[in-house]
Amino acid sequence: MLLEFTKMHGLGNDFVVIDLVRQRAYLDSLTIQRMADRHFGIGFDQLLIIEPPEDPTVDFKYRIFNADGSEVEQCGNGVRCFARFVYEHQLTYKTKIRVQTKSGIVEPELGANGWVRVNMGEPKFLPEQIPFVADDVQALYPLQLKDLEIKVDVVNMGNPHAVILVDDVLKANVAAIGPQVESHVRFPEHVNAGFLQVISRNQARLRVYERGVGETLACGTGACAAVVSGIRRGLLDNNVNIELAGGMLNIAWQEGDVVWMTGPTAKVYDGRFDLRYFQG
């Protein structure tokens, strides 16, 4: 069975996008893992699946799977690529759409030159909303790792994030600390670990060790969580350009309101694959 797909990326965070509105297929966890393999498969950070909506008030249903085959709630770079995909493939003629995700409704809006602005919803901070195991609510939580103790802020942007403030993001030991935070026992559903460096009141840098993927070139929800954390700590203003390895995002947030994320998308190529190859 031949299945059409499109390879896309948002700041180097790369995706395979599959339209299951016009096509039919079932992709289980093992199949997705094989597809994600960068040597024997197509290769991607996440798989994005487009389906008809279940809710009549929205335009599409959108599902996200990590490279390890696990389904996740939200992906900021992915939703921008999704919006550009459905418009360019004429699944819709709207430039502003409502999309059903596992974490709720998001509203991406297409702009010029492949840029997309997204209403990412309101951030959540209570431990049970992350989820995160804590006896009480704190501004920062101590987290004991193998060889050191760090302090994290916890933010849910449709998916869980732990934000760690660092002096120099380029020197941060993401490879060692990231996996320990991601799988820490206090995060029962695991977590995305963000390493935030504040440059000025409206500029920051970020690296993210993503749950189920590893370090990626960019993470949209991670950028939202990091900026929100920086604003809550009094370190950042309400409109911030945040630099990731793959490029720049703009994040805007006023306390008590939704987070707005604006950033680029890029199409790499269209292709087809025989699904039977990955089903083994």
Image (tube, rainbow, N blue to C red):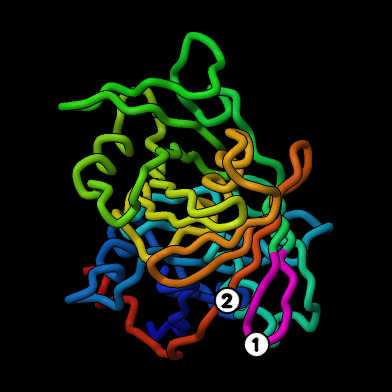
Q: Is residue 142 visible?
A: yes
Q: Looking at the picture, tell me which residue is in the foreground, 31 or 195.
A: 195
Q: Residue at x 50, y 86 (%)?
A: 267
Q: Is residue 60 left or right of residue 96?
A: left
Q: Is residue 63 visible?
A: no
Is 250 situated above or below 206? below
Q: Residue at x 43, y 57 (%)?
A: 65
Is 211 situated above or below 202? above
Residue hosting label 2:
264
| Element class at badge 1 | helix
Q: Quadrant of residue 43?
A: bottom left
Q: Residue at x 29, y 57 (%)?
A: 170
Residue hosting label 1:
113
Q: Is residue 58 left or right of residue 222?
A: right
As drawn, the residue found furthest toward the right would be: 57
Q: Which mark is residue 142?
A: none
Disc 1 marks a residue whose amino acid type is: Asn
Asked if the residues shown at circle 1 and circle 2 are in contact, with their CB atoms under 8 angstroms apart, the answer is: yes
In 3D space, how far apart are the residues under numbered discs 1 and 2 (Cα atoms)? Answer: 8 Å
114 in magenta: yes
Region of the chain picked out in magenta, as a range: 108-117
Q: Looking at the picture, tell me which residue is in the foreground, 93 or 252.
A: 252
Sequence-wise, which precedes: disc 1 or disc 2? 1
Rendered-image quadrant of the C terminus: bottom left
Q: Quadrant of residue 182?
A: top left
Q: Looking at the picture, tell me which residue is in the foreground, 140 or 124.
A: 140
Question: In x, y percent, where is residue 202?
Answer: 61, 55
276 in magenta: no
Disc 2 marks a residue whose amino acid type is: Pro
Q: Looking at the picture, tell me which residue is in the foreground, 38 or 35.
A: 38
Question: In x, y percent, where is residue 147?
Answer: 16, 27
Count of all numbered marks drawn on residues in the image: 2
